[in-house]
Amino acid sequence: MNLSRKVLSAIDQKQVQAPAESYFNLPEKVLQFGTGVLLRGLPDYFIDKANKQGIFNGRIVVVKSTTAGTADAFDKQDGLFTLCVRGLSDGKKIEENIINASVSRVLSANTDWAEVLDCATDINMQLIISNTTEVGITLVNEHIKNGKPPKSFPAKLLAFLYKRYQFFKGSPASGMVIVPTELITDNGKKLEAIVEELAHFNELDYKFIDWLETHNHFCNSLVDRIVPGKLNSNDHQKVEKAVGYTDELMIMSEVYRLWAIESDNNKVKEVLSFAQADEGVVIAPDITKYRELKLRLLNGSHSFTCALALLAGFTTVKEAMADDTFAGFIKGLMFSEIAPAITGKDLSAIEAKQFALQVLDRYSNPYLEHAWQSISMQYTSKMKMRNVPLIAEYYCRHKQAPERMAIGFAAYILLMKGSQKADGKYYGNFKGAEYLISDDAAGFYASLWNNKKTDEIVHDVLSNEELWEIDLTHFEGFEDAIKYYLKALQQDEALTIIKNTRSVKMTL
């Protein structure tokens, strides 16, 4: 049988968490722009969980903007889909199957625009969520009064808000909470600025603009959860056999989840009442520390160890974490070098340690196939954004070269050794294994490796302020450490080299 509302009573709740029939009578409170797996695996997860606890008591109208998508599948399954949570928590395996019933219906912006705007006249509507990719929050000057669906997400949002303003005659209570989840810093502020500029472009009434600015709340937010999407064919079939139904929309996510939302407004907290259902939702006046934790301890440790893992012959993150030597190196990097470089007034050592332990669980997740090669894409820009500030801060505090950071940086330089082929792309070759170098700086490195010796390469890389916006040779001892480890990596096995690093300091 296929998953739908009518089969819920026949489902074995020992195998899967299912919603009660009363759930389907909840009012529509949320308008969600996007049908992607991140939205379904994180915000929709929190809303569904809260509904099942009798807290939020509201469902979601999803707006899809692309012609491709899953609206038909949602219609056939009455908005239901299965979320399979897989991973580790405190080192223990977690396997949960959850039927999510938070989605009431899916509308197409292209063919159902009138219905989308009708949602603006529903007094129960309180919240707008979006994930339209990073390029979705961009300014496109377009008109919103011609009855046609605007092309850009900010213009669609403006049209919705203007319709709501007109219908409710500018009532303060009709203002919305808007929480974008696109992966850009200050996503809420940027979206608000674009919407306001579009309002002026459309020459909308100044009273509307006042209502827009005063009674609507745009919140910056940060999302963090790996949601790969569909399970592989074998695992999908195993789950369907266990739960007793087929599900075209079934997706998987890791256990860890975080939705940090920036606000100190009481109305925002009231609207986002689903935060009470799960500690993964954080509402705070400033979410900088959550962004810093993710950028440095999660993303930063990825970037510092990616080249080392590839040079050591590991294909996936979980494969590297299964090796005690490599796992010990990552632990030492996070606990002994990264965490001490970011903790201080606004971020405690305890918070950093707790987050690092969660990262280790996530890295070791046996259900995720996170490929190091994909992590290495645009490696140089990742090193610049995530890790160069860490190196600088470590030196500011400790006045010495961070050993593991130096090894990781040296491995990155070696991994960037490549040459251009007939297809115009750059390829590296390490011990007979060829790999693609997907990096804007690939040409720069190919020229260095073709024309200079190791010591010269290191100096030219570290002193290149166009790459790093800082001269890294100014950090005493760092250049010498990179030269030493780069030569060592060309002579010995990567695992042999990292075995000799100092022991892990597990306390901060």
Image (tube, rainbow, N blue to C red):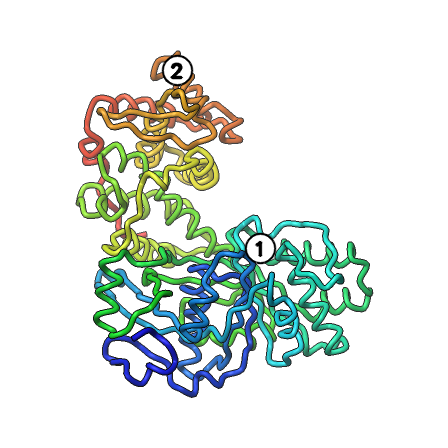
- Position of 487 relative to 388 (above/below): above
Question: Image point 44% across, 23% down: which residue?
Answer: 424
> CB under 8 Å between callouts 1 and 2?
no
- Position of 506 relative to 45 (above/below): above
Name the side, left or right, on which 170 lies relative to 339. right
Q: Which mark is residue 187?
A: 1
Question: Image point 69% across, 61% down: which residue?
Answer: 148
Q: Label 2: few (<14), some or many (≥20) within 10 Å?
A: few
The percent position of residue 10, horizontal first and vertical second, equals: 28, 83
Quarter-of-image position of residue 82: bottom left
The percent position of residue 50, horizontal first and vertical second, equals: 43, 77
Label 1 to label 2: alpha-carbon separation: 41 Å
Q: Which mark is residue 456?
A: 2
Front-lying residue, 66 or 473: 66
Question: Image point 35% across, 26% down: which residue?
Answer: 427
Front-lying residue, 399 or 383: 383
Amino acid under disc 2: Glu
Q: Secondary structure at mark 2?
A: helix
Front-lying residue, 358 or 42: 42
